[in-house]
Amino acid sequence: MYTIDLQSRTPIYEQLYKKVVELILKGELRSGDKLPSVRELAKSLGVNPNTVSKAFQLLERDKVIYSLAGRGSFVSDVTADSVKEKALADFDKAASEALKAGFARSELIERLGGGISGESNE
Amino acid sequence: MIELKNVKMDFDDFSALNGVDLTIPEGTAFGLLGSNGAGKSTILRLLSGVYKQTAGEVLIDSEPVYDNVSVKNRVFFINDETVQFGNMTLNDMRKYYKGFYPKFSDETFDKLNGVIKLPEKKRLDKFSKGMKRQAIVITGLASGTDYLLLDEAFDGLDPTMRIIVKRMLVDAMLDRKLTAIISSHNLKEINEVCDTAALLHQGKLLFNRDLDSVKGSIQKVQAAFEGEVTEKDFEGLNVLHFERNQSIVYIIIKGEEETIRAELEKKNPKVLDMIPLTLEEVFIYEMEGMGYDYNGIR
């Protein structure tokens, strides 16, 4: 479930962060679900525990998960909608920057048509 | 915490370390990178008290290392030369190290050898190279030290052993805040295991940063501009490499992605694509910048 690409240019902590968000969006992780411990994840992925901690800290900062001392980390009461809202806000920001940089709307639409990777649930 | 303060190490007419300052906080897995002869092993030997530095200070938890047993029995050094006990058996070696490392765990040793199954009563000089390596690695992991130095120790291990070592490191880092220093040529391994890394070249430290920021520290840019551009147009940026193919330019620039992007946007590019370099590419360009030209050797 928690797969990452060790060859990727994307930092491992960032991949983990995105993975958790993705799992929530896909409904595989639900509000209140317990996440594996830092130890379990670091061992199963073969990565540094500090890297896993870093991902967890950022997820906690963004209120995607919360942790209970001695019990572990759990998925917050984030609905898929609120995550989607954040994704849209990020998109709007990037699009507006691209427009400012001189791209035409049609160019951005074209880019959406082909150049962007990612799976849709539909 | 490990501290090297302006450390110099000279051997007769050769200077292995030329003023190295380095701090490694506890609980980190630290990667030491560099070409052969860069000074990686010298640093590890200083930290294990094998050598005494020519000048400067080598401190572990604020105490000098050389000739200091109370520090040295908290450090285990895994390297090929450690296996000098030809006429000993694995059990003899365990007893020897157990006498030196007060927190040595027989339980861990037995658990590990339960998986690896090295013969306990066979002389070590009858072991194959790989078995010797395994013997010293499991002894090191069982020694219960706060500091573990691995001198290219990952490089000679088979995939199963690598996974075992990685998992043991995770436990030790979480349970007793183990600090591991791993020297390696294998950037893939360093990338997975370490959180921080330093690059050494000819006895000097080129950088010492957390790995995520190392990866984003150099950008590969592909861009097209209105009219002709030359390398001179990018003088304000830290350009490591410039190449032009008709209207497309390929530039390697040192710096943060956002700063570079903002600077390039001012030139109204028709096309601008940026990708951060992988650790391996960063390594090659940093070394090239220091005059270590691998292109010269073909």
Image: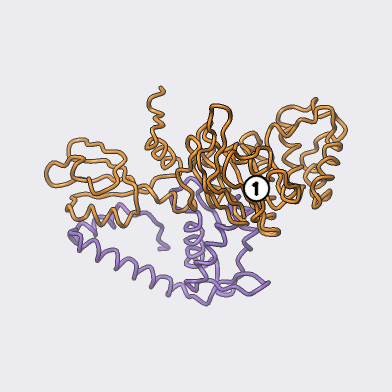
Chain colours: A purple, B orange
Q: Position of residue B186 (x, y in %)?
A: 54, 38
Q: Residue furthest right?
A: B121
Output the chain of dot 1: B
Q: Is residue B263 above or below residue A85?
A: above
The quarter holding residue B27 reads bottom right
Q: Position of residue B166 (x, y in %)?
A: 65, 47
Q: Amino acid at mark 1?
A: Lys
Q: Position of residue B49 (x, y in %)?
A: 68, 42
Which residue is nearer to you in this view: B34 or B6? B6
Q: Is residue A87 above or below residue B273?
A: below
Q: Residue furthest top?
A: B298
Q: Which residue does the image show at 47% across and 58% down from the upper left? A: A14
Q: Is residue B2 above or below residue B133?
A: below
Q: Which residue is mark 1?
A: B166
User: In this rendering, would B22 be left or right of B107?
Assistant: left
User: In this rendering, would B144 be left or right of B4?
Assistant: right
User: In this rendering, would B111 be left or right of B21?
Assistant: right
The secondary structure type at the circle numbered 1 is helix
Q: Which residue does the image show at 47% across and 53% down from the upper left? A: B212
User: In this rendering, would B232 be left or right of A43?
Assistant: left
On-image quarter of the C terminus of chain B: top left
On-image quarter of the N terminus of chain B: bottom right
Q: Residue furthest bottom?
A: A77
The quarter holding residue B241 reads top left
Which residue is nearer to you in this view: B35 or A106? B35
Q: Which residue does the image show at 85% across and 32% down from the upper left? A: B89
Q: Position of residue B59 (x, y in %)?
A: 63, 50
